[in-house]
């Protein structure tokens, strides 16, 4: 029966059953993740047409809306939260984070201001402090939760841009970039596309950066660094999206400092290596930078979307991000809306708090170490079968080729079609390859072995 939205009593009366039904369906979905096809079947994708109908005049019953979503939507999802999804860098959600997300959805808080949600603001602040401590960042590092690493990079680069221009007497937040002294931007040859996009968003241009050469693993080569003059931003990387390798921070940051440059690190997933004593040497010295972008929705395994922008100088972040108005609280030094590009925002920090409280320092290190170990196991299985592992497996990423481009494409297509696991394509140092990213808390050795067998069977076909 249709429940008109004006019938508040009826909607309230139906709410418990509706949410219990949602919970039951969600649990059934999660229970099926481990054994279902990873990529959805073509018929399931085609059936999504059933969700595309003329917007109804009188609305539909909420339980019917939910049933349609589950019956037509769930089968057409990718099992990226399951144990054998190795595409992009996509961790599944930890149950502790998922439970927090469900509770936060019930809270329905706007985390823009403490006055709008004392709980969200307090948990945001604790989560940011824990992240900074875990990653070995300087005490007092400021930050905020944003949609993902693309926005985290843009947030940090906006703060860096304004700070280096202020040192040269220019108020970029107030006056913009027209007439400003030119800002020199430096990136590595293997800079992630998200950093280029972020540079474009903050008015520094996707394509005008000086590009430093990289070595065979994608790390900036620190042996021949140019002199920098005037305001300068140096963009480094923790965790290449293909190889997993990180730039050598110690010499690069020392060089940038000599020239008075702001150092920003894109550490979307790789920054989490700093949380593991075993993996931390990969990112040695990263804490000396000025700003860092990371994602909780990648290796920390919270739900989407959850990027983290971290800036050493709170004042620099705040002056780039603050917004004032008569109806807003005057003291904005710690308010999330004054440390991030968005004003209204969901309470992303709550899930990060829950994930970190559940994992503890030891659990984050174990998650990082285990996924790195499983990536090495995957690479070993590929090498043993005679396939070309193209990278040194220093983190959780593996790049593997199966002969020429055509054959590699055919193997990737067969792997995806087979449904046991999912890996995506890439081109690494001029060679077509398959990317494997092991980023999920629930992947086991058995999942890796099943996936190796599936890939080998596709390659032998
Ligand atoms: C190194 C790096 N930077 C940035 C991004 C973009 O992250 P997001 O999709 O959260 O914006 C990614 C995504 O894989 C990445 O690996």
Image (cartoon, rainbow, N blue to C red):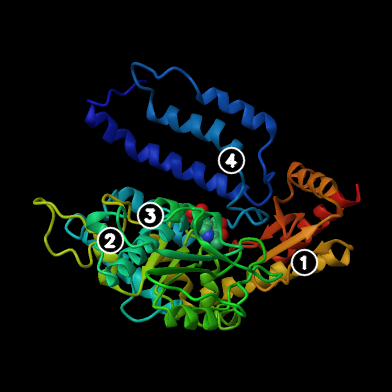
Are circles 3 and 4 on residues that touch, CB within 8 Å? no
Residue 105 in percent (x, y) is at 35, 49
Give the spatial CA distance, label 2 vs label 1.
44 Å
Residue 42 in percent (x, y) is at 69, 32
Residue holding disc 4: 77
Categorize mark 1 by other alpha carbons within 10 Å: few (<14), some (14-19), many (20+): many
Q: Which mark is residue 398?
A: none
Residue drawn at (77%, 66%) of the image: 379
Q: Earlier in the sequence, mark 2 or mark 4?
A: 4
Residue holding disc 2: 320
Residue holding disc 3: 202
Give the spatial CA distance, label 3 vs label 4.
34 Å
SS at badge 3: loop
Q: Which mark is residue 379?
A: 1
Categorize mark 4 by other alpha carbons within 10 Å: few (<14), some (14-19), many (20+): some
Are circles 4 and 1 on residues that touch, CB within 8 Å? no
Tell me if 412 is positioned left or right of 349 in this view.
right
Residue drawn at (60%, 82%) of the image: 278
Tell me if 68 is positioned left or right of 454 in this view.
left
Residue drawn at (72%, 66%) of the image: 445
């Amino acid at each position: 029966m249709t429940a008109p939205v004006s019938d508040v009593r009826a909607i309230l009366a139906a709410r418990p059953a509706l949410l219990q039904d949602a919970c039951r369906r969600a649990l059934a979905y999660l229970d099926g993740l481990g054994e279902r096809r990873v990529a959805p079947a073509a018929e399931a994708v085609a059936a999504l047409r059933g969700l595309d109908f003329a917007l109804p005049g009188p609305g539909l019953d909420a339980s019917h809306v939910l049933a349609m979503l589950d019956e037509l939507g769930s089968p057409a999802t990718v099992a990226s939260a399951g144990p054998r999804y190795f595409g992009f860098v996509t961790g599944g959600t930890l149950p502790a984070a998922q439970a927090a997300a469900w509770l936060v959805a019930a809270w329905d808080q706007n985390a823009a201001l403490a006055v709008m949600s004392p709980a969200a603001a307090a948990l945001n602040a604790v989560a940011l402090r824990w992240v900074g401590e875990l990653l070995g960042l300087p005490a007092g590092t400021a930050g905020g939760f944003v949609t993902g690493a693309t926005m985290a990079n843009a947030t940090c680069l906006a703060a860096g841009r304004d700070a280096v221009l202020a040192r040269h007497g220019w108020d970029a937040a107030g006056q913009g970039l027209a007439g400003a002294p030119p800002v020199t931007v430096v990136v590595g040859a293997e800079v992630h596309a998200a950093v280029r996009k972020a540079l474009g968003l903050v008015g520094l241009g996707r394509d005008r950066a000086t590009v430093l050469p990289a070595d065979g693993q994608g790390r900036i080569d620190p042996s021949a660094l140019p002199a920098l003059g005037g305001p300068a931003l140096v963009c480094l990387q923790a965790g290449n999206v293909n190889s997993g390798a990180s730039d050598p921070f110690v010499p690069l940051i020392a060089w940038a400092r000599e020239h008075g440059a702001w150092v920003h690190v894109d550490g979307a997933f790789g920054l989490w290596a700093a949380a593991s004593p075993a993996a931390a040497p990969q990112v040695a010295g990263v804490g000396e930078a000025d700003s860092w972008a990371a994602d909780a929705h990648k290796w920390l395994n919270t739900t989407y979307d959850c990027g983290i922008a971290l800036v050493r100088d709170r004042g620099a972040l705040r002056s780039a991000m603050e917004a004032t108005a008569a109806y807003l609280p005057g003291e904005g030094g710690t308010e999330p809306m004054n440390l991030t590009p968005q004003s209204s925002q969901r309470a992303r920090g709550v899930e990060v708090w829950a994930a970190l409280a559940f994992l503890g320092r030891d659990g984050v290190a174990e998650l990082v170490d285990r996924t790195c170990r499983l990536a090495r196991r995957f690479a070993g299985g590929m090498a043993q079968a005679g396939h070309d592992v193209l990278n040194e497996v220093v983190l959780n990423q593996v790049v593997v080729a199966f002969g020429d481009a055509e054959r590699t494409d055919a193997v990737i297509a067969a792997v995806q079609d087979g449904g046991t696991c999912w890996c995506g394509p890439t081109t690494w140092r001029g060679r077509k390859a398959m990317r494997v990213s092991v980023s999920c808390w629930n992947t086991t050795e058995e999942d890796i072995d099943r996936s190796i067998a599936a890939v080998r069977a596709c390659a032998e076909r």
